[in-house]
């Protein structure tokens, strides 16, 4: 399960497996909505949709490449962001 951090804490680097259906369970521990967005070269390739306050969300992605992706919150992209590493199984 992934939970965003903000402020002085760093968001984790996530690891996904190539050619595998990776399911991200996301917990929103705040009183505002968030949306988890995955990007490749600055372009959105997957998104969770809005995750309501104090609620869980989920995103499924099956990357077909090895390398690095980015992630951020649609509504808080400057503080809620990080990297995703895609590896071979």
Image (cartoon, helix red, strand yellow):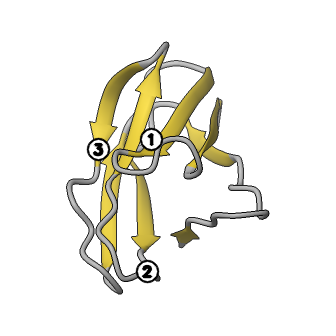
**Residue drawn at point x = 59 percent, y = 50 percent:** 79
The label shown at residue 55 is none
Q: Determine if residue 82 is in view.
A: yes
Q: Nearer the viewer, mark 2 or mark 1?
A: 2
Q: Toward the viewer: 8 or 41? A: 8
Quarter containing the C terminus:
top right
Q: Position of residue 60 (x, y in %)?
A: 32, 50
Calculate the distance from the C-alpha at mark 1 to the C-alpha at mark 3.
Answer: 17 Å
Residue annotated with mark 2: 30
| Residue at the image point whose x is 76% and y is 56% from the top | 10
Question: Residue 56 in the image: x percent, y percent?
Answer: 34, 78
Residue lying furthest top in this view? 41
Disc 2 or 1, which lies upstream in sequence? 1
Identify the disc placed on residue 47: 3
Residue at disc 1, secondary structure: loop
Q: Position of residue 37 (x, y in %)?
A: 37, 42
- Along the viewing direction, whichever of 36 and 89 lies nearer the viewer: 36
Residue indicated by mark 1: 20
> SS for tag 3?
strand
Is residue 40 or residue 42 the one in the foreground?
42
Q: Which residue is at 46% across, 20% downward? A: 40
């Amino acid at each position: 399960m992934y939970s965003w951090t903000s402020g002085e804490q760093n968001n984790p680097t996530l690891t996904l497996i190539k050619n595998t259906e990776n399911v991200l369970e996301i917990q929103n521990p705040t009183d505002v909505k968030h949306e988890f967005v995955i990007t490749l070269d600055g372009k959105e390739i997957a998104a969770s949709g809005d995750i309501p306050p104090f609620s869980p969300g989920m995103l499924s992605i099956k990357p077909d490449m090895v390398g690095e992706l980015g992630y951020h919150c649609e509504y808080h992209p400057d503080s809620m962001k990080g990297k995703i590493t895609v590896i071979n199984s």
